[in-house]
Amino acid sequence: MEIELNQQQRIIKDSVRKFLAKEITPLVEDHETGRKLISKDIIKRLEPYGYASGLVAEEHGGLGLDFVSYCIMVEELSRTWASLRTVVTSSALVTKLLSRKGTERQREKFLDQLMAMDELACFALTEPNVGSDTSALEAKAERDGDHYILNGTKTLITGGSLADLVLVYAKVKNDAGGKGITAFLVHKSESSFEARNIRKMGMHSSPLSELAFVDCRVPAENRLGEEGEGQRIALSGLNEGRVNVTFAVVGLGQAALEASIRYAQERVQFGKTIAHFQLIQDMIVKMALKVDTARLLGLRAAGLVDRGVDCRREASFAKLYATEAMVEVCNQAIQVHGGYGYTAEFPVERYFRDVRHLTMAEGTTEIQKLLLGREILGVSAFA
């Protein structure tokens, strides 16, 4: 397993970091403090770096980046602005699925605008009564000639109110369990739906939305895959999604670690900087160890994805460890800063709020443990 970045990956990391420091970092504090939602013109600035087109094959107009390179970009973006990262990678998920699972007509209709970041997409699976058990979806779609009539509510949808295109999952065959779930590409220019933003703990500049579909007419040509293939499509990118979240939290952990090192080297108490104190050193060393361990677990899983090797176990290990460990890292960063850490005068309180959500994204900590239990023991807790 390669744990060192190659030359191209180092160039990507350095160029992205320099760009983000110059163009994006100055925007963060004002937006987050004022709860200003990220605008599309800010998102558009990322287009040259392949945040939307990176995982799309060259034959479909994308950059065809390896997954490790893309994960490096995710870490850098999250290190800079977690709110921007979550909107961008959620849209990229749909873009990737469209490029891989869509028809030629669907790619012609939607893909170029998404890759150019002129339009955004979101992934709408979760419902008010449905989270981890995706087979229990309540949203329904009924065929009506050349359209489907979609009814249902989706919630906790990242970027929902910003999205032009929504990948919606609904049941076409009500008695078929997970087999009846079907995926639809719902574009706001041709199918009406309502979006309401939900106030949340962190990532104040990215919308988390509830989407309501009431007798929403969706062209039949916008069905992604065949009827009943929705759950397979939704689950097809789970390993990549979990590794993506791994690098998202590593970015936040890295930011918290760097902030703590700076503060420890500058803050003077009892006549010397607190970096001299053994307990501060102990905290920062443990933080650095957790960040490094999480990154290495992520690199292992990402490398397996690139080689086409099944990595359910490795992806879940990475996601489980990284999300829980980075919550601890961000919490310790507040402690290093003392009373200031609890204030908005320093960014570490934001890192803690932002990182907390990701223990639930792409399968909660508890779900990861059950999945790993099935992998290790050969016995399913879901049965």
Image (cartoon, rainbow, N blue to C red):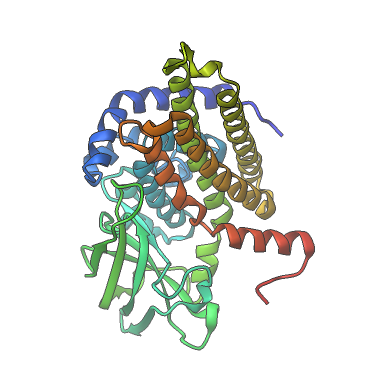
Q: Quadrant of residue 281?
A: top right
All told, the count of numbered labels is 0
Question: Which residue is rendered at x = 61% and y = 39% of the image?
Answer: 294
Q: Which residue in the rendered view is the most extreme toward the right?
A: 377
Image height of 300 relative to 186, above or below? above
Report whether residue 86 is seen. Answer: yes
Q: Which residue in the rendered view is the most extreme toward the bottom?
A: 175
Q: Which residue in the rendered view is the most extreme toward the top?
A: 271
Residue nearer the viewer, 121 or 354: 354
Image height of 40 relative to 73, above or below? below
Report whether residue 229 is seen. Answer: no
Residue nearer the viewer, 161 or 48: 161
Report the side of 355 relative to 371 (left or right): left
Report the side of 178 relative to 303 (left or right): left
> Where does the image place residue 41, in percent across and percent down from the top left?
22, 40
Residue nearer the viewer, 55 or 161: 161
Image height of 34 relative to 288, above or below? below
Residue nearer the viewer, 45 or 84: 84
Which quadrant would the C terminus be assigned to in this image? bottom right
> Where does the image place residue 32, in percent across and percent down from the top left?
27, 41
Image height of 332 relative to 166, above or below? above
> Where does the image place residue 293, in percent across and percent down from the top left?
64, 36
> Where does the image place residue 363, in percent across and percent down from the top left?
54, 59
Question: Which residue is rendered at x = 51% and y = 53% of the image?
Answer: 359
Report the side of 147 relative to 138 (left or right): left
Question: Which residue is rendered at x = 41% and y = 42% of the image?
Answer: 53
Question: Which residue is rendered at x = 42% and y = 80% of the image?
Answer: 138
Which quadrant would the N terminus be assigned to in this image? top right
Report the side of 76 relative to 308 (left or right): left
